[in-house]
Amino acid sequence: MIYCPYTNKDIESSSTNKEHIIPLSLGGSNSFILPVDNKFNSEAGSDIDGELANDLLVLFRRRSFDARGHSKKKPKILSKNSSMHSGARPVQVEFAGEEGLKVFDPVRRRTLSEDEIYGKEFNSKFNISRYGRLRFAAKTAMAGGYFVFGEWFRANVKHSEIRDLMNFNLNSERKNFEGFGLKVIDEFTTPEEKDISQLAVEKFFCQVINGSCVYFVPGPVNIGITVGVLGQFVATLNVPANTEGFPFTDENDLGHAVIIEGGKMQRMSYRNLAKKAYEHLPNRS
């Protein structure tokens, strides 16, 4: 039997497949994987991972890092819901980086020339999910926590609350989250004054990593879990936990981090992550 952190069940190995805890399209690694329930994995792959991977702001980062998924296709920033001439002419607009703007006319089935689009006004619509980052961070925290700490995470962290956040949708009711000890903040959240300094640290740590990361910092009655994708802070979850028996070893000094750069996974203590970040400080003495 194999424990699946997503479903909180022990299941037959025949009902599992390999899950990239951070998908390749978001800077993951073939080493950062875990066997999980194959049905859940299939659904979450499009519902949670796919939603963030196709988010407009994330797509720009994916293109910058050339982060490709299993299909190996180069990331495209494409708006199929666009128009030219104040909405009179439907088009598809691709933001092609150094190549500039590419405009495809679906009616005439051809790409318009530079002369045809020069000086024209375009309107494009994109969707950015308000809760997609929190759901993805919860999913990564869940699987990443079990990957790093195994049974300690299962027995001592209140992962039921992480799981509820991961499964959040527009039909979820506020009463389902009453009494939660879980506190979250993402890149769209305006922090409380007491959290500003700490949030600045979390963001800086994510930015100095040339890729993606998840790291864990135990507190007196909680564990802080931060997720970064392609050099950008995604979210921090402060989860209720019994940390009296936290496995403080050299590799878990002050906490533990998994960082992925260029598709290669590296694990280190939180102290060593802090040292890595220190090297990037300007004018350090």
Image (cartoon, helix red, strand yellow):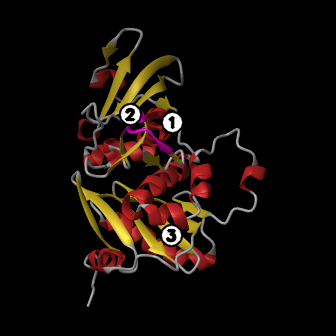
What separation in Å lies between label 1 and label 3 (alpha carbons)? 25 Å
Q: Is any atom of residue 233 visible in this view?
A: no
**Mark 2 or mark 1, whichever is nearer to me:** 2
Residue drawn at (39%, 28%), measured in percent from left and top? 93
Residue 56: percent from left, percent from top? 44, 41
The answer to if 76 sits in the magenta stretch is no
Which amino acid does the dot numbered 3 rest on? Answer: Gly
Which amino acid does the dot numbered 1 rest on? Answer: Asp
Q: Residues within 10 Å of mark 1 (few under 14, many from 20)?
A: some
User: Which quarter of the figure has residue 178?
Assistant: bottom right
The extreme bottom residue here reads: 285
Residue 15: percent from left, percent from top? 42, 34
Q: Earlier in the sequence, mark 3 or mark 2?
A: 2
The answer to if 11 sits in the magenta stretch is yes
Q: Which residue in the structure is indicated by mark 3?
A: 224
**Mark 3 or mark 2, whichever is nearer to me:** 2
> Is 125 left or right of 181, judged from the image as shown?
left
Q: Residues within 10 Å of mark 2 (few under 14, many from 20)?
A: few
Q: Which residue in the structure is indicated by mark 2?
A: 14
Query: Which quarter shows the C terminus?
Result: bottom left
What separation in Å lies between label 2 and label 1 (alpha carbons)? 23 Å
What stretch of residues is rendered in magenta? 10-17
Q: Determine whether 44 is above or below 160 in the image.
A: above
Which amino acid does the dot numbered 2 rest on? Answer: Ser
Q: Determine whether 46 is above or below 168 in the image.
A: above
What separation in Å lies between label 3 and label 2 (alpha carbons)? 33 Å
Please tell me the numbered disc located at residue 47.
Answer: 1
